């Protein structure tokens, strides 16, 4: 993900003759007020989804990591998670969304196409097992929500905050399954199969 930003910068400068700053919106920079608002919404969603998932699939299984080592690794991981999530927003809700909207204008183009590609980015049968199709569906819908938020606010800030907050929760809080709980405090049992039966 460290190479995504320079690659996007090269693409937008050489292919589209645009300033990299225009990807963020008309202001040319991240709206940090919207970013932190998105981060707060993500925190609220994490709490609500934890309660609902706990009620349906059971209590999360704690990884047994000690508090201080977890905190130390979390402080190192958080900036990297920001780099990853913001790079994805620049590509899917910045470059792709803007150019699809300019070329086609229709929601199916600028909303659905980048969101479907965003979902496919999370294709990982080895990591998600039987839940891989559920993950594709959920990430695709999440991508569409991010796209609509970006269109409504006119800036990448809120979508970046939402994305960063959700990834912090999934990677450092309660991971979706054992394949992604290396830095997490806990992971959900059953590898998502119970939730798949619900869907």
Image: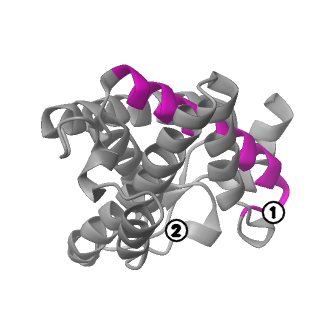
Question: Which label belongs to residue 129?
Answer: 1
The answer to which of 106 and 127 lies nearer the viewer is 106
Q: Main secondary structure of the magenta part?
A: helix
Residue occupying image coordinates x 24% and y 52%? 21
Q: Residues within 10 Å of mark 2 (few under 14, many from 20)?
A: many
Q: Where residue 116 sits in the image (x, y, percent)? A: 70, 44
Secondary structure of residue under mark 1: helix
**Label ID, residue 181:** 2
Q: Say whether residue 104 is visible.
A: yes
Q: Is residue 149 above or below residue 167?
A: above
Q: Residues within 10 Å of mark 1 (few under 14, many from 20)?
A: some
| Closer to us: 95 or 80 | 95
Residue 19: numbered disc: none
180 shown above or below 104: below
Q: Is residue 54 visible?
A: no
Residue that appears at 62% across and 67% down: 178
Indicate the position of residue 72 as horizontal and vertical percent values: 21, 76
How many dots with numbers?
2
Residue 122 sits in which quadrant? bottom right
The Cα–Cα distance between marks 2 and 1, rounded to whole angstroms, is 15 Å
In front: mark 2 or mark 1?
1
Q: Position of residue 121 (x, y in %)?
A: 65, 60
Question: Where residue 188 sits in the image (x, y, percent)?
Answer: 60, 52
Specify whether residue 132 is painted magenta.
yes
Closer to the chain start, of discs 2 and 1, is 1
Q: Quadrant of residue 2?
A: bottom left
Who is closer to the viewer here, 39 or 184?
A: 39
Q: Are marks 2 and 1 in contact (CB under 8 Å)?
A: no
Secondary element at image label 2: loop
Q: 177 or 97, which is in the foreground?
A: 97
The magenta stretch spans which residues?
128-152
Q: How is the image coloured?
A: one colour
């Amino acid at each position: 993900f460290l190479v995504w930003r320079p690659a996007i910068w090269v693409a937008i400068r050489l292919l589209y003759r645009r300033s990299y700053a225009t990807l963020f919106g008309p202001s040319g920079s991240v709206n940090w007020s919207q970013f932190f608002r998105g981060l707060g919404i993500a925190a609220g969603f994490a709490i609500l989804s934890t309660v609902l998932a706990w009620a349906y699939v059971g209590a999360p299984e704690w990884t047994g990591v000690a508090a201080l080592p977890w905190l130390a690794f979390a402080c190192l991981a958080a900036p990297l998670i920001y780099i990853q999530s913001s790079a994805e927003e620049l590509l899917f809700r910045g470059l792709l969304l803007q150019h699809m909207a300019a070329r086609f204008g229709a929601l199916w183009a600028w909303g659905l196409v980048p969101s479907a590609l965003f979902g496919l980015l999370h294709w990982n049968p080895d990591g998600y097992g039987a839940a891989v199709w559920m993950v594709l569906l959920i990430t695709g819908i999440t991508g569409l929500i991010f796209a609509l938020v970006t269109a409504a606010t006119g800036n990448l800030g809120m979508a970046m905050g939402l994305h960063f907050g959700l990834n912090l929760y999934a990677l450092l809080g309660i991971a979706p399954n054992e394949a992604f709980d290396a830095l997490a405090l806990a992971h959900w049992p059953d590898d998502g199969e119970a939730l798949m039966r619900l869907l």
